[in-house]
Amino acid sequence: MLCSQCKAELKDKAEVCHVCGHSKPNMEDVDLIINSLIEEDIMGSSEDIEVDGGDLGKKNSFRKVKRLNTGDRWIQGIRYMIFVSIILFILSLFTNWFTISGTTVDYGFVNNSYTQKYFQETENESYIEFSGYDLFNYSGSAMNEHKMIKKSDGVLSTSILSAIHMYIMLAMAVLLASSLAACCVAFLYKAFTGMAIIRNLAIVNLVVIGLNYIFLNVTFLSAIAIRAKSVIDQQKDFGTLHMTFNGISHDQYFYTYKVGENSGFYGTIIALGIWLTLSIVLYEMKNSEKVRAIENGEVDEVL
């Protein structure tokens, strides 16, 4: 070690220079001074030391670029996850969502010419399976049949609830179209661009799926259950039939109507949930980034 005053070489344990008599500095004090200078330099100001403005500007620019690069990696990672969730959602539209069973199916009251494609039989029961695509296909094929329902006296009447459900099933086409649009936006645009569009399309899809689920499970609303009641009216001399939450009844006769959710339906909800959640996260990140930029004076606040 050299003397800081005369540069003479000092002995290892020497506390004073044998040439000029200058005291050897305490290393702990040196560490404290260095750490203090580093801290003051990072904070950008010091009462005792004048910090070079050019160096401080470079350091601040480096920190800003590093922060932006880290943020961009997060944004791109989330954006790719949204893209993957949308692809999984599109694929899930072609998986089995619902299984309709019960005596309304066993006796063929639901199994009309349009549902033959989805009708299956086992040893114990008959059932019909619908995917999201099948709901749309069924609605497109049987729309006119469901608009007019025959009563027991043979009079045609407009079934408003049945027609509404048919249009809701027809709206399943919106799921595919909106998903493809969201997929293109997520793939083509960078950073926060288009996040509001992607989020809103996910909300639309959630509403369409939710309405289909409610209408299909409530016999009073379900177009398929209402159609089954119309068929029973024509084939059986029961008089007035009643719709219940569990099926169609008249005195001692009861025809069950059961709807079960399949794994494809739950997979669809999970994919849509991921899509919606991540798009909301990015949308909120966009808003917080805008607020930060306004507070730092980087952009002007738009009133």
Image (cartoon, rainbow, N blue to C red):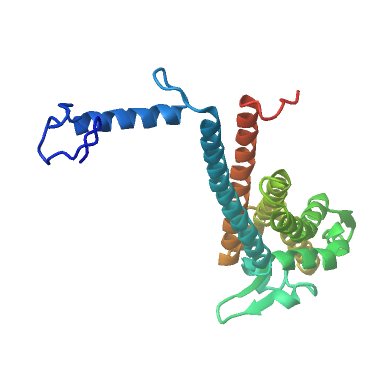
Q: Can residue 271 be seen in this view?
A: yes
The residue most toward the left is 13
Q: Which of 280 and 20 is in front in this view?
A: 20
Asked where in the image residue 3 lies, by quadrant, the reply is top left
Quadrant of the snapshot with the C terminus: top right
Q: In this rendering, does residue 257 appear at all?
A: no
Query: Residue drawn at (70%, 64%), measured in percent from left and top?
Result: 132
Query: Residue 243: horizontal and vertical position, in percent?
Result: 69, 54
Q: Nearer the viewer, residue 235 or 289?
A: 289
Which residue appears farthest toward the top when viewing the image? 47
Nearer to me, 13 or 136:
13
Side of 45 where 115 appears, left or right: right
Outermost residue to the bottom:
123
Q: In this view, does 218 lie above or below 130?
A: above
Question: Taking 2 as reference, is 279 left or right?
Answer: right
Q: Nearer the viewer, residue 209 or 151?
A: 209
Q: Residue 165 at x, y = what percent?
A: 77, 54
Left/right of residue 16 with respect to residue 36 in the rendered view: left
Q: Does residue 51 lie above or below 173 as drawn? A: above
Which quadrant is home to the N terminus? Answer: top left
Q: Residue at x 61, y 27 (%)?
A: 296
Residue 302 x, y percent position in the rendering: 75, 26
- Tell me the residue at 41%/22% (across/down): 49
